[in-house]
Amino acid sequence: MSTQPNGAGALAPEQKLARFLGVFSLSLGAPQIAAPGRVNRLIGVRDDRGSRRWQRIVGIREIAAGAGILSKERPVEWVWSRVAGDMKDLALLGSAMLGKAEDRKRLAAATGAVVGITVADILDAVALSRAPGRATPNGVRVKAAITVRRPREDVYRFWHTFENLPQFMDHLESVEPRGERGSFWRAKAPAGMKVEWEAELVDDRPGELISWRSRSGATVRSTGTVRFSDAPRDRGTEVRVDMEYQAPGGLLAATVAKLFGEEPEQQITDDLRRLKQVMETGMVVRSEGSPEGTSTRRLLRQRSAQPLTGDNGKRVPTLEGRTS
Amino acid sequence: MRATCWEGKNNVQVENVPDPKILNSRDAIVRISSTAICGSDLHLLQGYIPTMKRGDILGHEFMGEVVEKGSEVRNLAVGDRVVVPFPIACGNCNACLAGLYSVCENSNPNAGLAEALMGRSPAGIFGYSHMLGGYAGGQAEYARVPFADVGPIKVENDLPDEQVLFLSDILPTGYMGADLCDIQPGDVIAVWGAGPVGQFAIASAFLLGAERVIAIDRFPYRLEMARDKAGAETINYEEQDVIEALNEITAGRGPDACIDAVGMEGHHSHGPVHAYDRVKQAARLETDRPHALRQAIRACRNGGTISVIGAYGGFIDKFPMGSVMNRSLTIKAGQCHVQRYLRPLMERIENGEIDPSFVITHTMKLDDAPQGYDTFKNKEDGCVKVVLKP
């Protein structure tokens, strides 16, 4: 199982720039906190208690931004927070220019430097926002595989009946057939919202491969391919899934990722585990900690391992309960 | 119902909780007649197993009467007396069909958590953390038993609970420890840890044809049980150098196989060595203290087998891989595949070849579970095994 960012492993240019900005934040913040007086003199601001206090406040902000940026692979919010900080800095420098300046040449140079870094921050924030986490330039791509101890024909037929998909795909509410090659999909979205789209079969090789994609006009464009092959010896069927979700122009792909779980690759892996459970044991396996069965959202928000109370019990879907 | 709940490190309480319900058609509900505290429950008690949550019901050794069953449980009837194996196993996956029930591929709904720690997920276990499934345990009045059509063994004789209860875990676990040693006539087997599992490993090694079995521990009363009840020779590692004593017994060869029935919370006779691992464990630089395992590896004869049935949770430090590799040792390990051993061991009990009740030193009411945990943990009052009666 893996996701495929553009250029596996390597950092994209906007990520490299973010790293630089993070280090820059840290190396600016440290002297502002430790030696605010010296920084004041360096940038030509009058050195008094008030300006030193501002240096320290700005320094703390820089350290926070630096640490935030370096702690994430795609620190979109943190780089935007730098942009906001830049605006504040320019305002401070402006007011210094009007009043407290000691050395106007130095102050002008400092302001120029901040303008330059502001441009870099804005460019990077925009670039990071355009191509967010775990995303191809156009969307989110996930791959996963599992071995199911059932004949290849059975697994193929189960998947080919798209109405079965919600039994093991956690985010799907229902899939209904529409004509010969079409189907209508309903999925849960955050905050109780729902997304719906129409999909069509693109390729269908019995016992081997099923490929589908959403019809044009869908809010969320998606394509998916599942391949079936015999596992070595008598171990059943190897199932390999490759799916991609694409957002229309305005909607960010990160939002799409959230639609389908914060961790798309964990989610598709967990979905395949449910497929395996259903095909091998005839049911989704439930525990008191995970009463809905394997679910990425549940993993880190476990119930205590205690029997469910009456109300909880009713909310738990039974084996066939996903029909509602 | 009343149930023993984990309420944080070193804090268990018997509380009122909802009665269990059938969640799947292959579930059964069992009214528990006897349950026990396992040595591995102490790892949970003391906070060494991650992903515990307040309120989790503990306990994975239990038996009782079927009071309700799902529509697909056809092998059991309401009223049947059953012993429940601690690993939850589906019986359908490749692992189960190969007899590797404790690594069932379907029974852990939280497999993603276990994968984060261990790379791949083992089976779910009753009352043994959320990374192993988040299943409510059996130190309670009732328990839900998933895959009841696969796991539980019906007790069709009138042997008392005390003689069959330990089929749920410690008897097959000790037996598997000996089974993994591939014992040949004339073999000398050394067993680290004379707790309940160690006692059964000793007894099983004899059942499987060992010539001599040596038990290693530091508590005289446990060594006495190993001598008197299980027939072992004994080494108290606080009084004797273990390697020297084993060399003496085996004329320099070393034991043919070594069984680690201690696990992650071992002790070392040399204070500073114990302190080193204790500190690293407290600082979470290693999660397990592997004193017994290290010594077992050093002691084993060239080409011998190390059988690990003591529970480990995560990572160990200073692992003598050079000794393993250069001396052609084989390491075998596993949570017990209980389902595999249930029938043969039930037969051995019925035939009088072994009476597992000899390890029981304390029988208490379920409501006294916190005291039972304390007595067992602190090895007070000659405690070897605590059985709880709901």
Image (spheres, coloured by chain):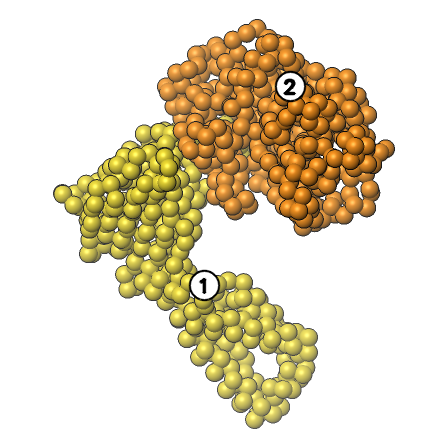
Chain colours: A yellow, B orange
- Write down the chain letter for disc 2: B
Where residue B13 sits, quadrant-wise, is top right
Report the disc number at residue B207. 2
Q: Position of residue A294 (x, y in %)?
A: 43, 38
Q: Position of residue A71 (x, y in %)?
A: 54, 63
In the image, is B110 to the left or to the right of B62? left
Res. B286 visible in picture: no
Q: Position of residue A279 (x, y in %)?
A: 34, 33
Q: Residue furthest left?
A: A179
Q: Amino acid at mark 2?
A: Leu
Respond whether the residues carrying marks 1 and 2 are from the same subunit.
no
- Identity of the residue drawn at 47% across and 83% down: A116
Relative vertical location of residue A156 with respect to residue A258 in this rendering, above or below: above
Query: Mark 1 — residue?
Result: A9
- Identity of the residue drawn at 16% across and 45% down: A181
- Identity of the residue drawn at 33% across and 43% down: A239
Relative vertical location of residue A248 with respect to residue B223 in this rendering, above or below: below
Nearer to us of marks 1 and 2 is 2
Query: Mark 1: which secondary structure?
Result: loop
